[in-house]
Structure formats: structure tokens, C-alpha cells
Image: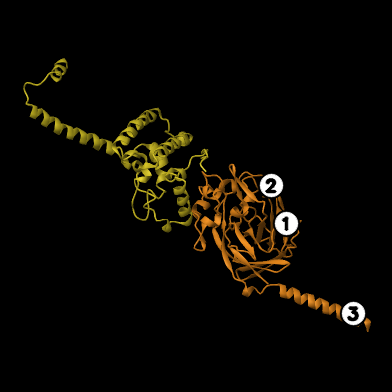
Amino acid sequence: MKKLLNTLRHPSAKYSLLTLLAVGFFSGIFFWGGFNTAMEATNSLEFCTSCHEMRDNVYQEYKQTIHYTNRTGVRAVCSDCHVPRDWGHKMMRKIQASQEIYGKIMGTIDTPEKFEAKRLELAEHEWARMKASDSRECRNCHSFEGMNTEKQKLRGAKMHKIAQDDKKTCIDCHKGIAHKKPKGMKEDDDE
Amino acid sequence: MKKTSLSLAIVGALLAFGSQLAQAAPDWNKIPKRELQVFHAGVTPIEWITKKSDHSGRTGLVKGESCVGCHEEKGGLNFDMKRLAAKELEPVGAPKTMNFPVAVQAAYDKDNAYIRLTFKAPTGGANNADKDNEVKVAVMFANDKVAAAAGDKSVPGDQVGCWATCHIDVRTMPGADDKKTKYTKDGAYELMQWKSSKGAKAVDGSVSDKRNMDGGNAGVKAEGTKAGEIYTVTFTRKLAGALAEGKAVPFGVAVHADHATGRFHHVSMGYKLGFGAEGDIKAVKQ
């Protein structure tokens, strides 16, 4: 071990700089690719629903919604809404999400009753994150510019007009779009 | 001889009065029909309507939008009827028919307003507690003071139809006192109702701090007939109180079908009935 550390600390007299750079470059690609592949794997629907906490609760609710099944077959999976796409925000979110491992070990939401008791708190965290990012993940697919309000139901068209005038963000109105709304929600003071 | 002349004079006067009455009653074939939808509203009282986490349309409401302005579309309703019928909003059970059309005709003269409602009453309701009446039909008119609170905002009655009387703590709402009737917090409604049971008197009442099934001053008369499956109910009442020429009066319709009671009715949203004024429905002057 000591020998390995010593070797790493001193310049190499045995290998050319080109060899070291080439090995470093290709190893970098290999490890970076591996890291990214592993991180992307944690973005899959299968990964998210591999824990019963997600599979038995929020996943069942989401399966009843338009983001799971719809006329055109475009599906938004968990990570499309809950994990940012750009690398920086994604890394931050992943690091933050690592605390869920602690929750898993401690069984924080391992029964439907415990999940219900925590639902409001968990939802509030996510709503706050979405509000702070101006509903960034919604806007990966949706935009006011791309909306044809004439093709919307009247109630939607009118509300979207108000939302644009008042500079609202998606999550201001669309709470509970993919999961049940929690009981005891605080009322927004936003008119 | 004198007696005969007097009798003839009385008969003549009665005939003249009778013909005047006959003239006053509108020729319904000439009065246009406006169809509006009545629907089973489940447990969506005014507290639900004005709570943003339940009904995001509250935002539109406090900005001056009416229920009809957002929810009546292409002659129908754009509600999510499945949501209205689901356990969360209808814990007792939804009727088989969630909504149906009612054709409304209206006319008026200097003394009276005439309103005719024509509809096919559905069966398959979840509440059949009224053993006496298969069908009841009510119309309510809001006065100018009706308002509904939405947080620290106040929504005028003409935007919310009859919902200003519909509260979470009134009878037949889940867990509510069986004796508490609908009520308003601000203003009042004039209420008229026809009941299908034989000999039932037309209701000439009101809703203020409670519902009053009599004591109204509108001189309400109601006639109802059933031909095949079609009900035709005609109300005659004074053009007074909340109703006046030159005014568009907020009103709503409720049909209790299939022996329903309390909140298990099909209701319309709030419309305006114009008496010589613009409205969703314009009463035809006689």
C-alpha cells in the first residue's frame, strides 16, 4: 500500500507522457461513461419503482394519470418531472436524493400509513423545488409559447391566460397532477 | 230586470278579466328555448369552490369570472364528471345520469314573470328519500346583496349561481346536522319550487340565514305535467322583489329527480335572466 502511494506521488520514469495521457484519456472516457450510465439507470421508471415505497404508493396513483398513459403515447416517467435534465442541477438533485437511502434503511415511509403521514411534507418539498425553478422540469416539455389555447377546454384556456398575465408557474395550479393531493394543504396566498 | 243587468255586468266583467288573464299567459310556442345543463354536483359546496387547493378556478372567480364563463362549452359542461362522481367528491354514490339538459323559456308582462322548464328526469339516483315526490323543480333568484367569501375576497352572487347558499355544514352533506338547511352569509335568494305529488302547493319561499319554504311575496303559481317521459313545469310569479324590468337577475335551476332530497339534486350553474335587459336568457315581453 505504502509502495503504491509512493509510486503515485513520484513522476514516472518508465512510461512516456504520451502513454500516460492516452491511458488517462481512455480510462476517463470509460469511467465517465460508466458513471453516467449508472446515474442514468437511477433515472429509469424501473429503478424508481424497484422500492415498494414508490411502487405501492405514488406509482399506482401516477398510473391513473395522463402523464402515464394518453392518446399519443408520450410518457413522462418519474425522473422527467423529479430530476433536472442539465448536469449541474441533476448532480445536486442526486446528491440531495442520496438521503433517501437513509430513509429507506430507517423505514421512514415503509407502510402506507407512514407514507400518508409524510405525504404532505414530501409534497411540499417537491412543490417548493418546482416553484423555485419556475417549474423547470414541466417546461422541458410544456411552454406557453407552444400552447394553442384554442384547442384547450375553455376552463384551461382562461386559466392559462390568467397564469401568463400574472406570471404564474405551472406548479402554482397543477399540484396533484400525477399523484393524489395531500390532505391539509396550505392555501396559497397568491391573488 | 235590474238583477239580470247586474248579473250580466258581473259575468261580462269576469269574462273580460278572464280574457285579460288568457292574454297575459304567453304563447310558449313563440318563446325561444335555451337549453342549460343541470348536473350532480357531489360534495362541492361554496367552501370547496372558493378553496384553491380543491378548485384552481377560484383564481378566475376572484378575478370576475363566473362558473358559466369557464365551464359551459359547446352547449355542454366541461367538468371532469368522473372526478365529480368519484368517492372523494361523492361518498354516498353518484347517480347514473350525472347531467341532463333543461330547456328554459321565459316571458314577462308588467305584472308577472313566466318561466317554463322542460326536461326528461333521469332515474338511477343514489338517494330516494322523498317518498312523496318523484320530481321537484326549483328556481332561485339572487338579490343584489348576495356574495360569497373567497378568503379575504368577496365574489358577487351573479358569478356563483346558487352556490352562495350551499355550504359544507348543511343537511345531507357528509357528517352535517340533519336539520340545517341551506343559507346565505350575505344577501338572500327568492325560491320557488314545484313538487310532483298530487295537490302539492307551489313553494313561494326564500333563502337567507335559513331556507324558508313559505312566506314569500312573489305569489308563486306552478303547474307541472308529464307527457311520456317529458316533464313540463311552468311557474308564474310577480315581477317584483329581485325581479324587475330593465334588470338581469341571477338565477339557478335545481331538479330533484327520482325521489331525491337535499343535495342529491341536479343543479345548473348561475345564469342571468334578462327582463328587458341583456342576459344569458332574455325573457320575452308580452
- Give, as a three-letter code, the residue at label 3: Leu
Circle 2 or circle 3, nearest the eye:
3
Q: Which residue is mark 3?
A: B6
Q: Position of residue A99 (x, y in %)?
A: 36, 29
Identify the secondary structure beneath mark 1: strand
**What residue lies at 83% left-to-right and 79% top-to-bottom?**
B12
Observer able to see residue B189: yes
How far apart are the alpha carbons under marks 2 and 3?
56 Å
- Tell me, what hue is chain A? yellow
Identify the secondary structure beneath mark 3: helix
Looking at the rendered structure, whether the residues under marks 3 and 1 are on a common chain is answered as yes
Q: Position of residue B115 (x, y in %)?
A: 66, 66
> In the displayed structure, would residue A45 be above or below residue B115?
above
- Give, as a three-letter code, the residue at label 1: Gly
**Most foreground residue, A120 or B261:** A120
Q: Which residue ends up furthest to the bottom in the rendered image?
A: B1
- Give, as a three-letter code, the residue at label 2: Lys
Q: Residues within 10 Å of mark 2 (few under 14, many from 20)?
A: some
Host chain of mark 1: B
Q: Position of residue A25 (x, y in %)?
A: 14, 32
Host chain of mark 2: B
Q: Position of residue B129 (x, y in %)?
A: 65, 55
Q: Is residue B209 left or right of residue B121?
A: right
How far apart are the alpha carbons under marks 1 and 2?
16 Å
Q: Which residue is mark 2?
A: B180
Residue B205: which numbered mark, if any?
1
